[in-house]
Amino acid sequence: GAGPGDPELLTLKALRALEDADVILHDRLVSPAVLDLARRDAARICVGKAAGHVGSSQEEINALLISHARQGRRVVRLKGGDPFVFGRGGEELQALAAAQIEFSVIPGITAAAGCAAYAGIPLTHRDYAHSVTFVAGHAQDGPESGAAPDWRALAMPGVTAVFYMGLARLDYIVAKLLEHGAPPARPAGIIAQGTTAEQRVMTATLATICGVASSSNLESPALLIVGDVVALHDSLAWVHAGAARDFSQTG
């Protein structure tokens, strides 16, 4: 796991793996500053996917991992955030296990935790939220999908819902929450380019968040957070534009 963007959020164990790797297969969203921490002679292969664009298929990525490992190389599969949170890490490990290739897993700070922290939005709070749910923003409804969100549960009071990559389907997500009982006044926020110097945070309510997002020209990667905890952003925000990495200089 490469973490959500700020290279200082990389774990020490991940850093040692990068310094030891012969080959690095990395996602598109992995920070260049993180890749710069790798050994200079390591091969860097971008296997990332972008919404609406052709990228490496999962089968191609699996084949690359297996091929390089069988050639005796030390391979790092570098994923944004955490490899086991919407990162297909489990699928890739299944392919390696089937090929009888040894592996280890280094967790990373997932986008929800990192971006919410940098936005001053506690995902849980004794007074506002007793649970938090991570949801794939592109999850589909319908009988053909076994992974459709439980919209009624997400709309309940005392719940923080975090939608990964939900900007493209923002209108749909908001409509489903309102349909299943979430009040229009429930706070909602979007964090774009979280934990980086380009971080932008927009807060509103379910009734107004779509208009705010449209007028602000926000771009992915972005997280949508819905819940009463979002209202704390105004008083708890500590990162400001262009200062996402200045926290170590505070007293």
Image (tube, rainbow, N blue to C red):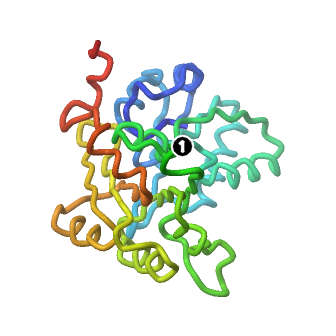
Which part of the image, by quadrant, shows the C terminus?
A: top left
Query: Residue drawn at (74%, 35%), measured in percent from left and top?
Result: 103
226 lies left or right of 243? right
Amino acid on which the number 1 mark rests in the picture:
Arg
Q: Measured from the top left, where is residue 200 in percent x and y?
A: 25, 48
Q: How many marks?
A: 1
Quadrant for residue 20, please give it: top right
Quadrant for residue 245, please give it: top left
Q: Measured from the top left, where is residue 236 in percent x and y?
A: 32, 37
Q: Measured from the top left, where is residue 18 in percent x and y?
A: 53, 25
Q: Name the foreground residue: 23 vs 6.
A: 6
Q: Which residue is mark 1?
A: 126
Q: Measured from the top left, where is residue 60 in percent x and y?
A: 59, 57
Query: Residue drawn at (54%, 43%), measured in percent from left and top?
Result: 126
Q: Residue lying furthest top in this view? A: 251
Residue 228 to residue 251: above or below: below
Query: Residue drawn at (26%, 44%), measured in percent from left and top?
Result: 234
